[in-house]
Amino acid sequence: MKRRLTWGLLYALIVTAICLSTWWSPALLLIAFIGSLREVLVMKALTAMVKLRTTLYLLSSAFATFFLWTHDAWSDIHSGGEVLLWIFILVWLSDSMAYIGGRWLGKTPLAPTLSPKKTWEGAIIGWLFTSLLGAVLLLWQMDALAQWSVPNSWPELAWKLPLIVGFAAPIGDLIASKIKRLAGVKDSGIFLPAHGGFFDRFDSFILASLIVGILFT
């Protein structure tokens, strides 16, 4: 557990630096998509059709991520890189709260054949916390927390982004679990010690960024 937490913190710091350090650095996220695609293509048990569909899925998400990074309609407070970082933060919040909720209250399996430890209770708690706490954090970051009691005045990004990511994150995780189960592997690779491969680490972000990109187009 200590090793997993250490590498997880390092991973979070690197992602933060990539999204915020310079105007071009979010382009480094392309490495994650290339790494994920490579891991999928070398899974020998996958059929050509599954590999093709997964390739299109990853390419679509990469294009959506590029759109979010370069989109010029964000408020002055948010650059494209900041929006990408917020997607990561909301994904991490969703995963953490779903895990905690599942451990405390989880009884009903969400997808027993794909991910036996996930429960409906954990997924609902993860979505609720991501939607509510995410909105608070975004309003605070936008210096608009005083508007918390007046939802109609919330900046669009503050309420839409947590809702979308809270919904998409667990589904992205299940999509990756389905692909890995078809391939007969537990982890997609060894990119991050104790965490697995690129596809393991970015599975929720891949779907979340795709849906956010589509809905904000």
Image: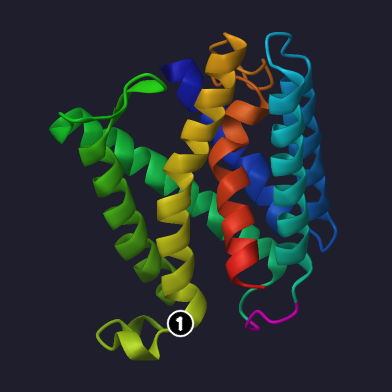
Q: Residue at x 36, y 39 (%)?
A: 96
**Stretch in magenta:** 72-76
Residue 215, quarter of the rendered image: bottom right
- Farthest-out residue, front: 49
Q: Please name the amino acid that badge 1 sits on.
A: Asp
Residue 21 visible, this orientation? no
For disc 1, the marked residue is 143
Q: Residue at x 80, y 24 (%)?
A: 38
> Does the segment drawn in magenta span residue 65?
no
Image coords of residue 90 (percent x, y): 46, 53
Specify the principal SS of the magenta part: loop
Residue 23, quarter of the rendered image: bottom right
Quarter that holds the N terminus: top left
Q: How is the image coloured?
A: rainbow
User: Where 22 falls versus 7 (above or below)?
Assistant: below
Q: Is residue 110 left or right of residue 70?
A: left
